[in-house]
Amino acid sequence: MIDKVSPPEIVDPHMHVGDFPLFDVGMDADGLVELFAEWNYAAGIVFHPDNALVRDLVEDIPNAWALYWANPREPGCADEAREFLGHQKFLGVKMHPLLDSYHPNDPIVHPVARLLVELGMPTLIHCGHPIFTLPWSIEELVVEFQDLKVVLGHMGHGNIVYINAAIDVAARNPNVWLETSGMPMHTKIRTAVERVGEDKVMYGSDAPFHDPGVEIRKVQASGLGMEHQRRVLATNARRLFWGSDDAPVSAGPVDTVNEEERHGI
C-alpha cells in the first residue's frame, strides 16, 4: 500500500486540466483541488490547449500555476505567449510537437524559444514518441538555443532506447532537465540523478493521464535516499519554475481586472 503521508511535499510541474476526449480523461478545478489534498501537493503546474480555460482555473486556486500551451503552427503564437506569460500565474511554456505536428527545431518554434530566453522561463516538451518528439530531435532545439531551459517531459516515455537517449541528452546539455511521468522504469530515475545531477531530475504525474500514487511510488522505489527523493519530488521543480529551493508556491488572490487590463487578455 502506498504511504500517502511519507512524501513531505510534492511540487508537480506536469498536469493537465480540462477534457481530453481522445484519451477519455479530464480534470476540472474540483478534481485538481481534491488531488492536491489527497497527495500532499504544495503546488501543481497545469496546462491545456485552451489557455484561457487554464488562466481562469488557476486564478481561483492559490497553489495552482500554469504553462502556456504553445502551438507554433498557429499564427501569432509568440505574441499570444508573451501576453499570457505576463500573467502572474504563468511560469513557462508547454510544447507538444507530437499532438500539434511540428519538428521541435522547426523555424516556426524559434520565436517562442527566443521569447523564453528573453524572459528566462523554461519550456516543458513532450518527449518519447516518433516522429516529432524523440530526444535527439528536441536536442536540436537545445543546441540551437543553449540559454533555453528545456524539460524533457516523460524523459523518453516507455521505450528504453528513448529513455536512455533522454538521459544522454540531459547529461551532455546543461540546459536540459528530466521529468519522470509516464516513464515506467523506477530504476532509471536513480540512474538519471547519478548521471545528470541531483538538481536536474523532477517528478511529474501527468494527471489525469497517470495516477499520482503510481508516479510517487516510482520515486520512492528508485533506490534514491530520502534527501534525493525530496529533491526529485519537489525541490528541483521549485527551483526551476519559481527560482529557488524555498520559493513560495502558493499565491494570494489574483486581481483579474488588473491582469486583463495589463495584458489585454
Image: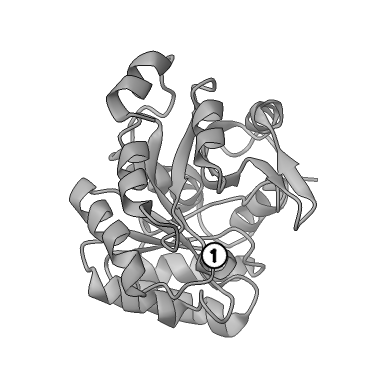
Residue 243 appears in which quarter of the rendering? top left
The residue shown at (29%, 66%) is 110
Q: Amino acid at mark 1?
A: Asp
Q: Is residue 245 visible?
A: no
The residue shown at (39%, 56%) is 75
**Residue under pointer 1:** 100
Q: Secondary structure at mark 1?
A: helix
Q: Position of residue 121 (x, y in %)?
A: 29, 48
Colour scheme of the rendered structure: one colour
Seen in the image, is 50 located left or right of residue 115?
A: right
Q: Position of residue 241 (x, y in %)?
A: 36, 43
Q: Outermost residue, bottom direction?
A: 161
- Which one is nearer the viewer's eye here, 198 or 225? 198
The residue shown at (35%, 66%) is 109
Q: Is residue 26 visible?
A: yes
Figure quadrant of the N terminus: top right
Q: Outermost residue, front direction?
A: 75
Q: Position of residue 141 (x, y in %)?
A: 32, 73
Figure quadrant of the C terminus: top left
Seen in the image, is 237 located left or right of residue 56?
A: left
The residue shown at (36%, 77%) is 139
Q: Position of residue 196 (x, y in %)?
A: 37, 69
Number of numbered markers: 1
Tag 1: Cα neighbours inside 10 Å, few (<14), some, or many (≥20)?
some
Residue 106 appears in which quarter of the rendering? bottom left
- Which one is nearer the viewer's eye here, 102 or 224? 102
Work out whether 92 lies above or below 255.
below
Seen in the image, is 217 located left or right of residue 179?
A: right
